[in-house]
Amino acid sequence: MTIKETLKLNRTFEFIIAAIMLILATYFLIPLYLMIVNSLKPLSEIRGGNMLALPIEASLDHWKTAWSSAQIGVQPIGLRPYFINSIKMVIPSVIISTVMGSFSGFVLAKWRFKGDEILFGLILFGCFIPFQIVLIPTAKVLGMLHLAGSTQGLILVHSVYGLGFTTLFFRNAYKTIPSEMIQAAQIDGASFMYIFNRIILPLSTPVFVVSIIWQTTNIWNDFLFGASFGGAASQPLTVALNNLVSSSTGVKEYNVHFAGALLAALPTLIIYFVSGKYFVRGLTSGSVKG
């Protein structure tokens, strides 16, 4: 095969791959497009049947309704208080699980002790336990700690459940750091925290980004734990959104429902748009190798 034929074949493959990627991108973006355009339409346009059409009378009033005055439960308070509940739950949970995961990952990667591989295997096994299996024992533990139905209880649940994933990320990332660096510091009399702060932490930015994005997305989008362990005053946004769209009384305000769904998805969309490249960079830097 000549060079000219090879180049032509490569261009053909590139065109085919680009076409496939365009089709897949269109397929995945159509639902987002539908949600956006229909959140701006009045109900009369939506009931007209052409949901793909652009709005004739676009308005942000439905977003305002979803945010501050939609009927959720007994009071028409909108999604705003539940949005705040999710923020109060997500930030501490992400910080705790990420910090604890960095310590446990460092220990399991660079410190040898009896049963360390068994312990890591058990932690890894915990990552794949379905949520439904742990509901009853978790409810009992929260009841014993007097944290049932509270934001603090949800923070504890998400921190513990996310610890397996963060430990996995950090352990595999720290496996790539030469052990000679740790041994040299130990010979010089450096403590555990000194080694972690001066040697490990400066090399941990990519895996911290991966862990934070992963945990933020998972915790923000969680419904089962929020519905099971959240009280009336501590329910997260996902539970409130379900209550909004599942209402069986009055007129189904589909435009408000679309707006509410977009409000719930907005934080994670922003995170991926702003830091998606750092997430990919963290993954390819060794955070999921090993």
Image: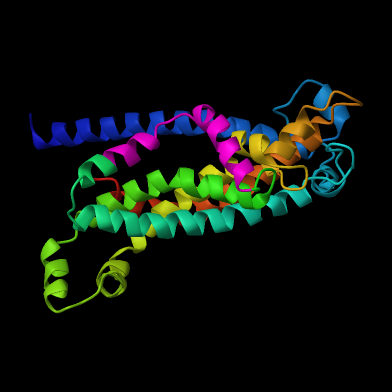
- In the displayed image of the protein, which residue is found farthest to the right? 250
Question: Left or right of 105: which side holds 159?
Answer: right
Q: Main secondary structure of the magenta part?
A: helix
Residue 45 or 246: which is nearer the viewer? 246
| Residue 35 on image: x %, y % | 69, 35
The residue that appears at 16% across and 74% down in the rendered structure is 185
Compared with 286, 6 (above or below) is above
Q: Residue at x 20, y 30 (%)?
A: 9
Q: Picture coordinates of residue 255 (x, y %)?
A: 80, 34
Position of residue 129 measured from the top left corner of the image (x, y, whole percent):
43, 31
Q: Is residue 136 magenta?
A: yes
In the image, residue 178 lies in the stretch drawn in magenta = no
**Residue 272 in sight in this render:** yes
| 200 to 209, vertically: above or below | below
Q: Position of residue 22 (x, y in %)?
A: 45, 33
Residue 281 position by quadrant: bottom left
Q: In terms of depth relative to the viewer, which is nearer, 168 or 189?
A: 189
On screen, residue 186 versus residue 254, left or right, reads: left
Identify which residue is drawn at 39% across, 28% down. Answer: 20
Residue 77 relative to residue 33: left or right? right
In terms of image quadrants, where is residue 285? bottom left
Q: Residue furthest top?
A: 49
- For the C terminus, which image quadrant? top left
Closest to the observer, 159 or 78: 159
- What residue range appears in magenta? 120-145
Task: Using the rendered image of the protein, determine whether residue 277 is visible from the camera's viewpoint.
Answer: no
Foreground pick, 102 / 245:
102
Q: Residue at x 53, y 27 (%)?
A: 132
How many numbered marks are there? 0
- Residue 160, placed above or below residue 22: below
Quadrant in which the N terminus appears: top left
